[in-house]
Amino acid sequence: MTPLFALVRKQLVESRWLLGISAVALFGLIWLFVFATNRMENMGRARGDEFAQMRRQAMSRGIGGASADGSSTSLEIMWWRHPFVVLIIAMWPIARGSAAVGGELEKGSLDLVLSRPISRNTFLTAQVLTAFIGIAILAGAMVGGILVGNRFNFIEAPPSLMKILFPCLNVMAFAVAIFGYAFFFSSMDIVRWRPNLVASTLTLAMFIANIIANVPVLENWKWLEKVSIFTAYDPVESALRAARLPLNVEILGGIGLAGLILGYVAFNLRDLPANS
C-alpha cells in the first residue's frame, strides 16, 4: 500500500463515525421526505381540490426555489435545500477541511507523519481524497434515500435516476466549495477550532444572506445573492431542466479549487511548529 492510500485509509478510519452517522441521517431524512411527498399527493387526490396543484407549487417554490413547479420531482428534490439536509451536507466538508492541517498540528501527529518519506503535498492530497470520498458517500446516501423511498411509497411521477444524479452533482460541488475554504483556513492555522469556527460562521452567513436576498420585500438586498454560494446550490433546477447546472457546478467547483490551491501554497510556504 502506497503512503498516499495508507494515509487516506487512516483518515477514513478515524472519521468513520462522523461519516457513517451523517450518511445514515441523510438516507433516513431523504426517505422521510419522500414519504412526506407521498402524503402531500394523497391529500390532494383525496380532497379533489382544484387548488391543490397551486398549493403544491407554492410550497415547492418556497423551499426549493423559483425553479420548482409542483411536480413530483420538484416536491422530492426541494427537500434537499431543507436546513437539516444542508447542515448534514456541510458538516463533513467543514470537519474534514478544518482537520486537514490545523487538526493534525493540534494533535501533534503531523510531525510523525512528515518524519516518514512522505511529502507535504502527499499529506495534503490524502486529506483531499478522504474528503472527496466522504462527499461521494453522502451524495450516494441521498440518491439511495430517494430510490428506496420511491420503492416503498407511491409517487405520481417519480424522477428517473438521471434526474436524481444531476442534483446529486450539484450537492457534491456545493460540498467541495465548503471544503475548499475550510481547507484553506486550516492550512494556515495550528489548531482546529479556529478554521472550524470561521468556516461554519461563513457558511451560516452565506445561508442567511441568500434567504434575505430572496425575501420579496427586501429587494434592495438582492445583491447578497452574489456573495453566497447558496445561489449556485439549486438542486431542483438541476433535476427539472439542468440549464444552470454547468454554471453552478463551475462556480462551486471554482471556489473549491481556489481554496485547495491556496491551501497547498500556504502549507508549503509556512514553517511548522517544532512540536507538530
Image (spheres, helix red, strand yellow):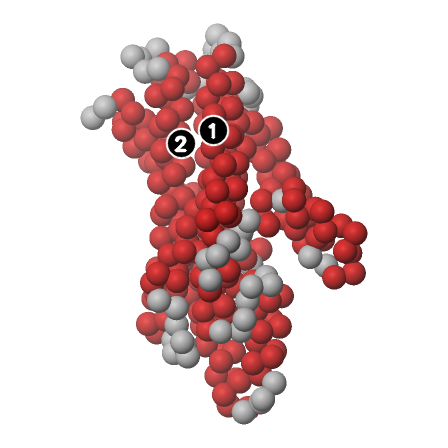
- Could you tell me which quadrant the N terminus lies in? top left
Rendered image quadrant of residue 133:
top left
Residue 80 seen: no
Which dot, 1 or 2, sits closer to the camera?
1
Rendered image quadrant of residue 201:
top right
Residue 127 in the image: x percent, y percent?
39, 29
Q: Which residue is mark 1?
A: 260
Q: CA distance from mark 1 to mark 2?
A: 8 Å
Q: Is residue 12 above or below residue 172?
A: above
Q: Is residue 212 above or below residue 68?
A: above
Identified by mark 1, the residue type is Leu
Work out whether residue 242 or residue 75 is closer to the camera in this orientation and state it.
Answer: 242
- Residue drawn at x 39%, y 68% is 159
- Residue drawn at x 32%, y 31% is 8
262 left or right of 161? Answer: right
Residue furthest left as drawn: 1
**What element does badge 2 sit on?**
helix
Residue 45 seen: yes
Rate crowding at label 1 as few (under 14), some (14 to 19) or many (20 or more) other CA atoms within 10 Å. many
Which mark sits nearer the N-terminus, 1 or 2? 2
Q: Which residue is mark 2?
A: 128
**What element does badge 1 sit on?**
helix
Work out whether residue 20 or residue 187 is closer to the camera in this orientation and state it.
Answer: 187
